[in-house]
Image (tube, grey):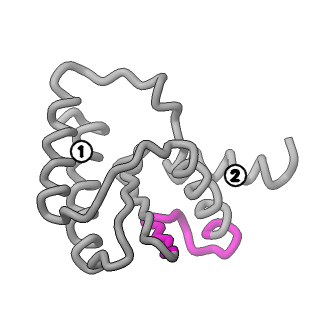
Amino acid sequence: MTEPEAFESEHSLRSGWSAPDPRSVSLPTGVEAMLEDHLNKLRSAVPELSSPIVAAMCAEIIRVGVHVTGSTGLGEPRELVIRAHKGYMAVFAAGHSTVLCVSGPPNLNLGLLGIEARRAAARIGKVLDFGL
């Protein structure tokens, strides 16, 4: 294992920003409905959002974010936002081993996104980390 790979593996484990394979995750009974409820609340609060199924891209965004924040001594990343010509993609920590990844149009209200996505990520993290 090369030095950067070792750093990324070690830091990802410490930070909780590892990206598990979504196909390997099985949810306890009722948890999927709770998660869908939290995502629906976020969609209602910020209707411009979409939650794309882009696990590989989110995993790469997280990998780069962990590397950059670890290299610069900033600590573990909590949020990553990318502004592009045609919109935004944002990743929010949602508990110890889960992230919430959303995308929206260029006119997305980032303040509202920050408030609502942080709330949703916290609720999702509680469900997945503690089964609440």
Quarter of image, res 122: bottom left
Horizontal and vertical percent for residue 104? 35, 65
Q: Label 2's element? A: helix
Which residue is tagged 2? 8
Q: Is residue 131 above or below residue 89?
A: above
**Residue occupying the point 43% across, 59% down:** 91
Q: Residue 8: x, y in percent?
A: 69, 52
Q: Which residues are magenta?
A: 69-84
Dot 1 lies on which element?
helix
The residue under the point 85% across, 52% down is: 3
Q: Nearer the viewer, residue 21 or 1?
A: 21
Question: Which quadrant is the C terminus positioned in?
Answer: top left
Q: Is residue 70 magenta?
A: yes
Q: Is residue 68 left or right of residue 18?
A: right
Identify the mark nearer the N-term, 2 or 1. 2
- Which residue sits furthest front? 86
**Residue located 16% across and 31% down the image:** 33
Q: Position of residue 9 (x, y in %)?
A: 68, 45
Amino acid identity at mark 1:
Lys
Q: Which residue is mark 1?
A: 126
Asked where in the image residue 111 lies, by quadrant, the reply is bottom left
The residue drawn where x is 22% and y is 30% is 32
Question: Callout 2: few (<14), some (14-19), or many (20+) C-alpha neighbours within 10 Å?
Answer: many
In this rendered view, identify the residue nearer to me: 115 or 11: 115
